[in-house]
Image: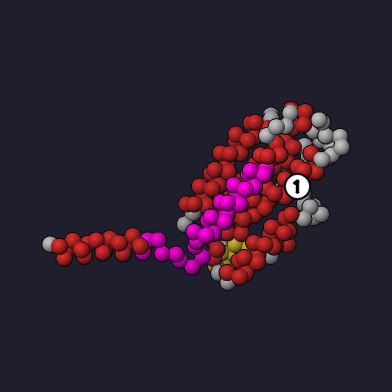
Amino acid sequence: MKKLLSTTVLMAIWVLGSSFTLREGDLTKEDRKYVNDYLKQSQKELFSRIKNLSQEQWTFKATETSWSPAEICEHIFKTEGTLVKRADAMDTTEWKPMPESYVNEKVDFIIDFLQNRERKFNAPEHIQPEGQFANAKAFISEFKQKRGETIAYVNEIEKPLKGYYKDFGPLGEISGYHWLVFISAHTQRHIKQLDEVLENPKFPS
């Protein structure tokens, strides 16, 4: 009886252990922590800029064609869901696992590329701002929920996102994992844009 019990326990341990075995292309515990820490960091940076903005400051535009803090934040919000969907859909692209050195180098490249505000891009129509958030408080409330959903996705995704690659123009070949990193890098890019607005000499006091 004791021998049978021991065998059962060992089998259970083996089954449980095998269910957590990483496959090629799976996100590691370290990958998930890196992405989630970056998501939390970029959210904290964003909220620190806008949490005390008055209504006048929230809607201030330096020029007729430039974006206000409200519009910048709405663009960040809209883009988040698009990027999560793009990452999740990468398992329909080419299976092409890369060395970890390439993965890490591409992470650094994406962050550096997006932080360079000298490169300008026109946002696609579906992620253009339309006046969704009346004030900073409303934005913060909804963005917390949106970012929380992104973090939950990163924790729960079981697709081997590091193994699927597709060429994305100036970024070259990137994986689903890289799209998850892109989310926070994109947020930080627009935090820089936000800082430009906040530092404008005409910005309301």
> Magenta stretch: residue 51 in it?
no
- In percent of width and height, residue 18 lies at 36, 64
Q: Look at the picture and state if 193 lies above or below 181.
A: above
Q: Is residue 120 left or right of residue 110?
A: right
- In percent of width and height, residue 3 lies at 16, 65
Q: Quadrant of residue 133?
A: top right
Crowding near pointer 1: few (<14 within 10 Å), some, many (20+)?
A: some
Q: How many marks?
A: 1
- In percent of width and height, residue 60 lies at 80, 33
Q: Is residue 104 left or right of residue 17?
A: right
Q: Is residue 155 left or right of residue 179?
A: left
Report the residue at 84% width, 39% height from top.
Answer: 200
Q: Look at the picture and state if 183 lies above or below 91.
A: above
Q: Residue lying furthest left in this view? A: 1
Q: Amino acid at mark 1?
A: Lys
Q: Look at the picture and state if 1 lies above or below 134.
A: below
Q: Specify the color scheme.
A: secondary structure
Q: Nearer the viewer, residue 159 or 124?
A: 159
Q: Quadrant of residue 193?
A: top right
The chief SS type of the magenta part is helix
Report the residue at 49% width, 59% height from top.
Answer: 29
Report the residue at 55% width, 69% height from top.
Answer: 97
Quarter of the C terminus within the rendering: top right
Residue 11 seen anywhere in this rendered image of the structure: yes
Residue 133 seen anywhere in this rendered image of the structure: no
Q: Look at the picture and state if 72 lies above or below 83.
A: above
Mark 1 sits on what residue?
192
Quarter of the N terminus within the rendering: bottom left
Check disc 1 and report its element: helix, strand or loop.
Answer: helix
Instruction: Please provide the residue range marked out in magenta.
Output: 18-46
